[in-house]
Image (tube, rainbow, N blue to C red):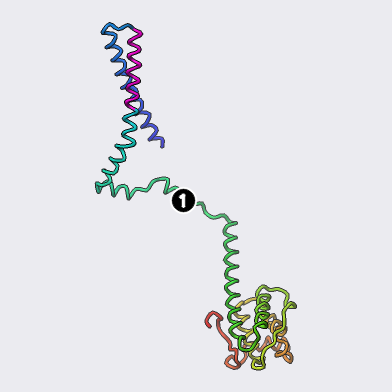
Amino acid sequence: MKNNLLEYIILYILVASAALTIATMARISAFSLGVDNFTSFIVFFVVLGIEVAAYLSIHVVLQGLMLPWIARLLLKIPYFKNKTKSTKPIDKITNQITEPPSLEDIRNEQLQNKAKEREEKLNVALNYTRKTFAPYVLDEQIEFLCVNLQLYADKLNLENLRSIKTSKDLSSIDISHFGWNIWNHFNIGKRIEIAHFLKRVFPDILKDVEVESIKSHLKDDELKGIIKIQKSLTEQ
């Protein structure tokens, strides 16, 4: 920026010096021809004005017409064409430099990622639940069960759970396997909590089974029953 300004100053000084020199020579010539001092000054300023007008006209023509034409002509030459491609403007390079994110932005991004991960995990569990219980539970009851799962996933009060009625095809071992799969999928809390969850949600099937017994036998007889133990609900 400073170099460009210096170049303009030098250019204008040279142009002004040349214009003053020519105007002075015109004044001297007029004076030598017998013109009075006042008229010679008039000649000086008239010549100087003509020079300024001529310079501005030439400058406008060069900048508006000649320079773009010369630039297009030079770009056809391989040397200048390659040089233009390999040179990036400073302002573009400056625009590419971005400030690092603030700590608040990093925290917000982490919270958003955790919320997204939780939502994806919940959707997997809900899809598994609907698919598993669809043949044995009424549609309305399945939706109640899904609401119960959301309460469990959000670690909310389990006293707000609604009981679910299932067909007689399912047994306590099926409910235990379901509980294990859900507990293993969310990986939250202790097994006693999923045992309480199952006891409240399936009171008919588990009416004769104590909570501690449910906790101890969640994964028993993995290959028995309609609902099997699964290593991962995402691999259905």
Q: Position of residue 162 (x, y in %)?
A: 72, 80
Q: Secondary structure under badge 1?
A: loop
Residue 123 part of the magenta-drawn span: no
Which segment did they paint magenta? 37-55
Residue at the location (32% across, 33% down)? 61
Residue wearing tag 1 = 97
Q: Position of residue 124 (x, y in %)?
A: 57, 77
Rendered view: 199 above or below 10:
below
Residue at the location (31% across, 34% down)? 62
Pick whichever, 148 or 88, lies toward us. 148
Q: Name the amino acid, label 1.
A: Ile
Rendered view: 4 above or below 221:
above
Residue at the location (57% across, 73% down)? 120
| Residue farthest to the right, as pictured | 159
Rendered view: 178 above or below 79:
below
Q: Position of residue 213 (x, y in %)?
A: 70, 89
| Residue farthest to the left, as pictured | 77
Pick whichever, 104 or 78, lies toward us. 78
Rendered view: 29 above or below 115:
above
Residue 52 part of the magenta-drawn span: yes
Residue neighbourhood size for the residue with mark 1, other residues' Cα within 10 Å, grouped as few (<14), some (14–19), many (≥20): few
Quadrant assignment, res 48: top left
Quadrant assignment, res 134: bottom right
Quadrant assignment, res 154: bottom right
Quadrant into which the N terminus falls:
top left
Tell how many labels. Answer: 1
Give the prevailing secondary structure in the magenta stretch: helix
Q: Position of residue 235 (x, y in %)?
A: 52, 81
